[in-house]
Image (cartoon, rainbow, N blue to C red):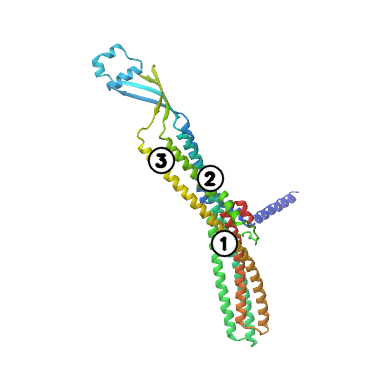
Amino acid sequence: MISRLYHTLCLTLLLCMGGLAATAQEPLTLRQAVDQALGQNPAAAMANAGGQEARSAATMARTQLLPHLNFTEDISRGDDPVYAFGTRLRQRQFTQDDFALNDLNRPQPIGNFATRFSGSWTAFDSFKTQREIRRADLSRDSALSSSKAVNQQIVLHVVESYQAVLYAQREIDVAQHEQETAAALLNSVAQHVKAGLAVESDQMSAEVNVAARKEELIAAQGDLELGWAELREAMGAPELKVSELKPIEPHVFSQLALDEEIATAAKTRPDLMALAQTQSAQASAVGAARSQFGPSVNAYGNWEEDRGSLGSSGGNNWVAGVQISVDILPMGKRAQLAQASAAKQKIDAQLSASQQHVRLEVSQAHIHRQTAALSLDTARAAMDQSAESLRILKNRYGAGLATITDLLRAEDAERQSQSMYWKAVYANTMAYAELLYATGTLTPNAAEDLQ
């Protein structure tokens, strides 16, 4: 019974370890890379911190509507005549003897323990506070929109880096295949030379071809290492180990009319939204600067208890009032208004320039998307044609009807066509991702659809 239980536990442990190993070997998907980047990339962390800072500023702006209340415990001692006279009055300890001229001029040192509560409240400031609150709210919204724009940039960078790794892997596959083909060709040519069906220069050309294919494989391996370095940087994961990536298969992506894509970008681009919200915030800042020219009404109050010692009794007093003030020479406020107005004109120009630039970006992405789709069809046809041409020339060379130069030229064309095809595949996907980014719709879910 114990032996059977032991074997059962061992089998369960082996199955669990096998399951963990299978899980560890699962390829890294594009969505997983994007999610990890949004959680670990320093740019995303900075954008999130900026949004939190803006939210705190909006909360702080609202505190201006609340009354301010202060508590003070003041301990003092001195023989200043005015201080001594006033302290005895506030302590309610003043007597007839304290009117003696010598005591008034040269009082004995006196101590005072003062407990004080004071408060103030701005009842009306010509709506300056309300406009500053609105400005803070719009600045918060702008920061959140900017954070979304940063996230989309991160997604685009991850897609680009992810595809660079995949393309480098494909280039290595092509280079390895071509190296094997070149080695087989060299062996075939060597046999033809021995049989007297080819000259030694054919063998030398085949050997040069083998060396060239080795150089291409080395270059492809270097590109792969560089691609992984860029992917680590994009994901914010410097310790990311080299693993298998889930391939991005060729897709036929849908495409809208250019006018529709431009309209979508105008509504959904987070950077445009951030600028528009900053523009509205600056308009509120101009309004707040104008409000400073109006009157303000402030209420205030003070309650105080004064004692000769900490535990003794004393006197208390209070004061309350309302203050109305108007700045009749607001030179500094005029400068502030001029500064706010200039900042508003600046953000207006920035928004207009950004809108024009976005239209150009969408137009460029639209054209690149069309070009990439056509290039993919052309590259696929060229690859099929070059493969068939190479097959025919191999048969002709074997029959002595073609030269080694013709065969090497066909082999080179076939290799280039494969490389061009996979480059077109990834260029097509990248062009669609750039179009999504240009229209402001490159979300993690949209990136997942690329795969």
Q: Nearer the viewer, mark 1 or mark 2?
A: 2
- SS label for mark 3: helix
Q: Amino acid at mark 2?
A: Leu
Q: Amino acid at mark 1?
A: Ala
Q: Amino acid at mark 3?
A: Leu
Q: What x and y, as percent, mark residue 77?
A: 32, 23
Q: Nearer the viewer, mark 3 or mark 1?
A: 3
| Outermost residue toward the right in this view | 1
Residue beneath the point at 35% across and 38% down: 331
Please indicate whether residue 74 sits to the left or right of residue 57 in the image: left
Q: Residue 164: which disc?
A: 1
* Between discs 3 and 1, the one toward the N terminus: 1
- SS label for mark 1: helix
Q: Which residue is mark 3?
A: 337
* Between discs 1 and 2, the one toward the N terminus: 2
Q: What x and y, as percent, mark residue 334?
A: 38, 39
Q: What x and y, as percent, mark residue 253?
A: 64, 59
| Outermost residue toward the bottom in this view | 196
Please indicate whether residue 228 sits to the left or right of residue 289 in the image: right
- SS label for mark 2: helix
